[in-house]
Image: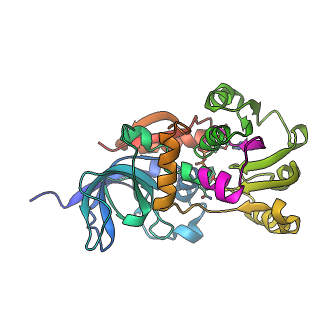
Amino acid sequence: MSDPTMKAVLFDRYGAPDVLYVGRRPRPAPGPGEVLVRVRAFSVNGGELAARAGRVRLLTGRRFPQRVGLDLTGEVAGLGAGTTGFTAGDRVWGVLGRTSGFGSAAEYVAVPAERLGQVPAGLDLVAAAALPVATTAVTALGDKAGLRPGERLLVRGAAGGVGNAAVQLGRALGAEVTALARAANLDFVRDLGAHEALDHRAVTPAGLGRYDVIVDTAGSDLTAHRRLLAPGGRMVTIAFDLSRPVASLGAIAASAVHGSSRIRFFSGNPLRADLDALARHVEAGELRPAVDTVFPLKETAAAHRALEAGGVRGKYVVRVD
Ligand SMILES: NC(=O)c1ccc[n+]([C@@H]2O[C@H](COP(=O)([O-])OP(=O)(O)OC[C@H]3O[C@@H](n4cnc5c(N)ncnc54)[C@H](OP(=O)(O)O)[C@@H]3O)[C@@H](O)[C@H]2O)c1
């Protein structure tokens, strides 16, 4: 009989990356409408670091072991009752839902079918793991900000997981892109397509220009950056400062008086249509995976440590062999 368990990355208490270890959990069985995915890779996301460190324990609770991993690429290994749209062996990608929490850092995961899409042909499944969260950039620039050709776009956190995709897409959509990143990453963001790259630690908001669209992945100084909007401008943030949550949420709420030029916060929840839109951007050559380093599963803690240290170029990806 095949092994009913699988490897999964777990932690038994909140803390530094060292709390992560590879343990064994029961292999999930796909429920009705779900797909069992043999995971090939996942990436490390900023939000997971906060969860692992216990900075959002009001949401993550006190039950252990807990899991990590939010996005995934892999192959369909089984279908739950009534699940349609996929067949065994399909190459898929997706992001786990708000209610299912973390858990893609494992050999297998059961995912609602509507949360998965087909990976474009020819795209390596390990590299492709850098892309599912790029759906956040697609939504930010599209539905949320309505970026138009010729507009001036400012991307904060431009070298990061979401930011690198915002730079690539902004350029592809015909915007004039200014990227804020650390000095060591300025060439990287220029290579992604930024027309202008500025060291975020050397400029203050007052030293920046006027922008039609601002995509913020840093979450700090939101009000000062909102003031950079040109008339009719739109600002989208996907982050807020966890060290000052009340101030960040207050800034977002207070900006409502500015109407369409308020600070728009949103939380991505990508479904099949979003993943298909992502695939079309990849197929059109508008978006490519930016992989900083690939780690093996047993070094997931090192991947967390690397992201926490700062300076990422795109995504840290973890391979599940
Ligand atoms: N709402 C949503 O749907 C959603 C989806 C995905 C992520 N998020 C959140 O968005 C944030 C970014 O996620 P991510 O995965 O892209 O993280 P990431 O890969 O760690 O990227 C964050 C980037 O922000 C940069 N940065 C930090 N402080 C900055 C500052 N003051 N000015 C300009 N840039 C700064 C970092 O640069 P250095 O490395 O040089 O410091 C890094 O490149 C996280 O808080 C995450 O939880 C939200």
Q: Nearer the viewer, residue 281 or 201?
A: 281
Highlighted range, magenta: 138-160
Q: Quadrant of the N terminus?
A: bottom left
Q: Position of residue 83 (x, y in %)?
A: 30, 69
- In the image: residue 132, left or right of residue 313: left
Q: Nearer the viewer, residue 271 or 184?
A: 271
* Residue 120 falls inside the magenta stretch: no
Q: Quadrant of the C terminus?
A: top left
Describe the colour scheme in one phrase. rainbow
Q: Residue furthest left?
A: 1
Q: Position of residue 17 (x, y in %)?
A: 49, 47
Residue 80: quarter of image: bottom left
Q: Nearer the viewer, residue 303 or 188?
A: 188
Q: Position of residue 172 (x, y in %)?
A: 63, 38
Residue 11: quarter of image: bottom left
Residue 164 visible? The answer is yes
Q: How many marks?
A: 0
Q: Position of residue 196 (x, y in %)?
A: 76, 30
Tell me the residue at 44%/68% (across/down).
Answer: 100
- In the image: residue 214, left or right of residue 317: right
Residue 242 visible? The answer is no
Tell me the residue at 22%/59% (across/down).
Answer: 5
* Residue 143 falls inside the magenta stretch: yes
- In the image: residue 298, left or right of residue 6: right
